[in-house]
Image (spheres, rainbow, N blue to C red):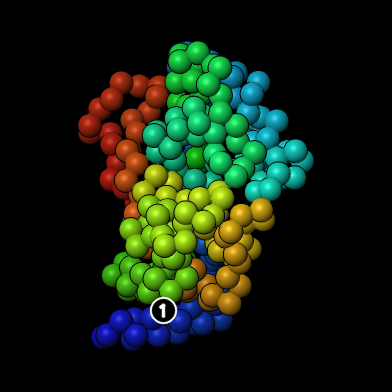
Amino acid sequence: MGPKGLLTLLLGMSVAVASAGAAQGARRSGPGPSTQSSPQLQQGREIFVQFCAACHGERGDGRPASGLKLKPPAMDLTAFTLSDSLIRRALEEGVLGTGMAAWKSLPGEQLSAVAAYTATLGRDDELSPQARLAPDPALQEAGRRVYVVHCARCHGNDGRGDGSDASLLKPIPSSFAELRPSYAAAARVIMGGVSGSAMPAWPLLTRAEVQAVTFYIRSFYHGPERASAQAPKDASRVRPARR
């Protein structure tokens, strides 16, 4: 089957699944953060509540009125897996074109603590068998085709936020090498756009196309799979990356 046939397969399966009333979307992959056994995470949460919650909310979901009024709105930190380097850079340098300010005045120990806590907020998800519209190779190829047409000009061929138009935009496009969206978050952004940014809505994309391009985007992520901050690093506990 050729690439065009793969995309046709996805579209056909999307109609079939929708008409059969299949379950929506994705499953969350674990509980939220716990700060009970890590002094660093406890300190990080206290700093987060003091300095970050006004915009991002105490849970990190970006839902306070002050955060929602920003252009673009404050990031929902629960909806993305973020690399350590991205979190640290945002804290130390801020994010140009957004309301995210630099926090260089915080001592290094406090920066490390709030960065570690922020890294625990993201709750990834994965496709359930009922929601998956095609095998992985078909999703990857169909997603690549959607991405090339609609996304690469800003986000770059390799998803690093360095497309041909990226330098003209503020805030700059996300680098998917450092940020992996959940399926639910990606669907919201793709279908609704991001107010106050150059990210437009793509309401004409089908459910199958949204799922496929999200699957493809998630394959760019190069952030580390972190061992729990509450326990020593153990290679046997590190899980392989999911799409």
Query: Quick one: which residue is furthest to the front in this view?
Result: 168
Q: Name the side, left or right, on which 223 lies relative to 94.
A: left
The C terminus sits in image quarter: bottom left
**In this picture, is 240 found above or below 85?**
below
Q: Name the side, left or right, on which 159 lies relative to 51.
A: left
Q: Nearer the viewer, residue 148 or 24?
A: 148
Q: Name the side, left or right, on which 150 lies relative to 76.
A: left
Instruction: Give x and y (percent) for residue 93.
Output: 50, 31
**In this picture, is 227 found above or below 47?**
below
Q: Count residues near mark 1 (Cα–Cα under 10 Å), then give few for <14, some for 14-19, many for 20+.
A: many
Q: Nearer the viewer, residue 34 or 185?
A: 185
Q: Dividing the picture into quarters, in which one does residue 69 lie? A: top right
Q: Can residue 44 be seen in this view?
A: no
Q: Is residue 61 visible?
A: yes
State the residue at coordinates (47%, 70%). 150
Instruction: Give x and y (percent) for residue 89.
Output: 45, 33
State the residue at coordinates (44%, 65%). 153
State the residue at coordinates (28%, 70%). 137
Instruction: Give x and y (percent) for residue 45.
Output: 57, 22
**Pointer 1 residue:** 10
State the residue at coordinates (39%, 71%). 148
The N terminus sits in image quarter: bottom left
